Amino acid sequence: MRQSQLSFPYEGELYDRRCPMLLRLLAAFAIMIVPIPVATAADAHVVAAVRISDDKAVFATVEAPKPVPARVRTGGTVAQLTIKEGDEVTAGQVIATVGDEKLALQMKSLDAQIAGLEAQLAQAKTDLSRTESLFERGTTPRARLDEVRTSVNVAENALRARVAERSVVDRQLTEGQVLSPTAGRVLSVPYTIGAVVLPGEVVATIAEQNFVLRLRVPERHAQFLKAGDRVRVDGAEIGLSGTRFGTIKLVYPQIEDGRVTADAVVESLGDYFVARRIRVWVSGGERQAFVVPSSFVSTRFGIDYVTLQLGSQKSMDVPVQRGRAHPTPEMSDGVEILSGIKTGDRLVQP
């Protein structure tokens, strides 16, 4: 029988073929020990387990703490508007003037009555002076003197009444000026010049200063949400760079549509746009984790490494599993490490 012509590679040839692949695998996962200079405190980080919040991303809106309405105190016609949407106002600023023609006519009538009563009082005082002179000489009886004195008192009281009535009308004219109840930003102005308004109607809505982030969190996270908790906002969401941190100021007790409402204070939030949606990270509980600066983590061939300091002159690259970013006020570039390091490890810059 003819011997088969099939040939099989010998063992050495198989090794030669597999050697490049083995070398690549060993190069990717090998732990390399190289001499390094002594690391300073600024170039080293000691690994320690810390408690971090299990952040959840939710959407919040920029809101005024309390939108305050500016109401009309007297009815009439809007004669002047000094504001528009988006304007910034101060507390007590005149934002509109409401006029009533009837009040002006009533004021003119009272002025005429006051002028007549003043003339009547002046005549009564003159008659009183003349009657007193005649009474002293015995040519006029006391009854006439008492009658003239009563006329003076009646004229004085009538004048006081008309002056008080004029003050009331003048006050009504003054109350035609609509004042801003608080300092802030004008959100809406529903009326124009010439519009007829009734007492108590809203001429403008003012957004109070110091805008807040109004969070609406699912009620299953209500037990983890409390005043004083920290929230995190990406600076790019509000037109700034870096990460911004804030604090929850108030958690509302009423749950609406399965959501808990809370107000958070964040610096540099702005004071112009209202109801703007921003993504915010809030705490959904706490757990233990390893957080290191991202500058201590390097990536080669798709694998993350950290460099451990073994001694004064040696270091070792160790593969780790990187988690999510966890920036904090103390560590703005913090990143969670899920595996590969332990408490007490000393990391150095790669």
Image (tube, rainbow, N blue to C red):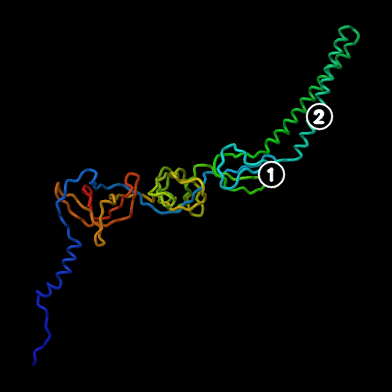
**Image-based side of 139 in relation to 159, left or right:** right
Q: Provide residue 231's location: percent of width, then percent of height.
A: 40, 47
Outermost residue toward the top in this view: 137
Q: Provide residue 177's location: percent of width, then percent of height.
A: 66, 38
Residue 240 against residue 173 in the figure, above or below: below
Q: Secondary structure at mark 2?
A: helix
Residue at screen point 42% across, 47% down? 225
Residue assigned mark 2: 113
| Mark 1 vs mark 2, CA separation in Å | 29 Å
Residue 155 against residue 12 in the figure, above or below: above
The disc label shown at residue 78, or none: 1
**Image-based side of 282 in relation to 98, left or right:** left
Outermost residue toward the bottom in this view: 1
Residue at screen point 78% across, 37% down? 105
Location of residue 131 (image quadrant): top right
Residue at screen point 28% across, 53% down? 337
Taking depth in this image into account, of 106 and 57 the one nearest to the observer is 106
Outermost residue toward the right in this view: 139
Residue 76 against residue 161 in the figure, above or below: below
Quarter of the N terminus within the rendering: bottom left
Q: Secondary structure at mark 1?
A: strand
Instruction: Check disc 2 and give the amino acid type.
Output: Gln
Taking depth in this image into account, of 252 and 339 the one nearest to the observer is 339
Q: Provide residue 262's location: percent of width, then percent of height.
A: 47, 47
Give yes or no for contact between labels 1 and 2 (Cβ–Cβ under 8 Å).
no
Location of residue 89 (image quadrant): top right
Instruction: Check disc 1 and give the amino acid type.
Output: Val
